[in-house]
Amino acid sequence: MAERFWIALIASGLAATVTSAGIYTIRRFEKWAQQNSTYFLCFAAGVLIAASFLHIIPKAFAMNAQAPVFLLGGYLILHLFNRFITAYVCEKDPEAQFALGLVAMLGIGFHSFIDGFIFSIMFTVSIFTGVLATMGMILHEFPEGIITYLLLLRSGFSKRKALLLSFVAAAISTPLGMLVSYPLISQIDQPFLGAMLSMSAGALVYVGATHLLPQAEKEPKKYSLVALGSGVLVAVIIVLSGA
């Protein structure tokens, strides 16, 4: 049991490392990223929406008969959070779009935290199952780091704050989720995990479809649809790799 704990912790730490690599990469090429931020918004929306509908939602529905309720709940929670940020935070600084980064950070952060639960469960089943799950899950960590950092930066946060918040939300949240869930693994059944996955999917659909795409449409660019299609393609590759 102790051996599986350490392997699960290492695997979740590897996921955090890959996410951090995405954050470092986009920080290294920050000027180029800012110039093409609209394309990144479309790409991010494609990844989040397609991954949710093609993988997370079907998986959650198979685990929990009430998953549609939690899916709607995740969507509405982020909607209300966005309304709160827009009404009470953005009011103080009309030039900054804090809601853009904070809502995306919350949605991606919650999903990454639930990824930690999945690491715990998969390695408890068997080391082989955990390794297979890790291979599929790690593929989506790199773009998550890029997306979170860029959106925080675009929404008015300083480089230092964007770096710190994206690291906490997208990277460190996965091993944290693993550490929190592992002692409770006997109490985490499929219906509970299905509910959590469904809520995270609702949050990600909100971030992609209701939050990012309208922002991208405010600054239409020639290859926006190509960027959106590329995001969908990456999500399809991730889903097929994890299948």
Image: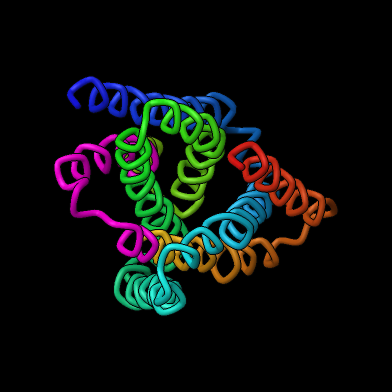
On screen, 212 above or below 176? below
Q: What is the span of residues highlighted in magenta in the rendered image? A: 167-195
Q: Position of residue 163 (x, y in %)?
A: 38, 35
Nearest the eye: 153 or 67: 67
Instruction: Say which quarter of the image contains residue 198.
Output: bottom left
Residue at the extreme right of the image, as rendered: 222
Nearest the eye: 52 or 104: 52
Residue at the extreme left of the image, as rendered: 183
Q: Position of residue 102 (x, y in %)?
A: 38, 58
Q: Residue at x 69, y 40 (%)?
A: 237
Instruction: Say which quarter of the image contains residue 83.
Output: bottom left
Q: Position of residue 175 (x, y in %)?
A: 29, 35
Q: Position of residue 188 (x, y in %)?
A: 24, 54
On screen, 213 above or below 4? below
67 in the magenta segment: no
On the rendered structure, is 88 left or right of 136?
left
The mark total stands at 0
Image quarter hosting the N terminus: top left
On the rendered structure, is 7 left or right of 38?
left
Q: Confirm whether residue 97 shows in the render.
A: no
On screen, 87 above or below 33? below
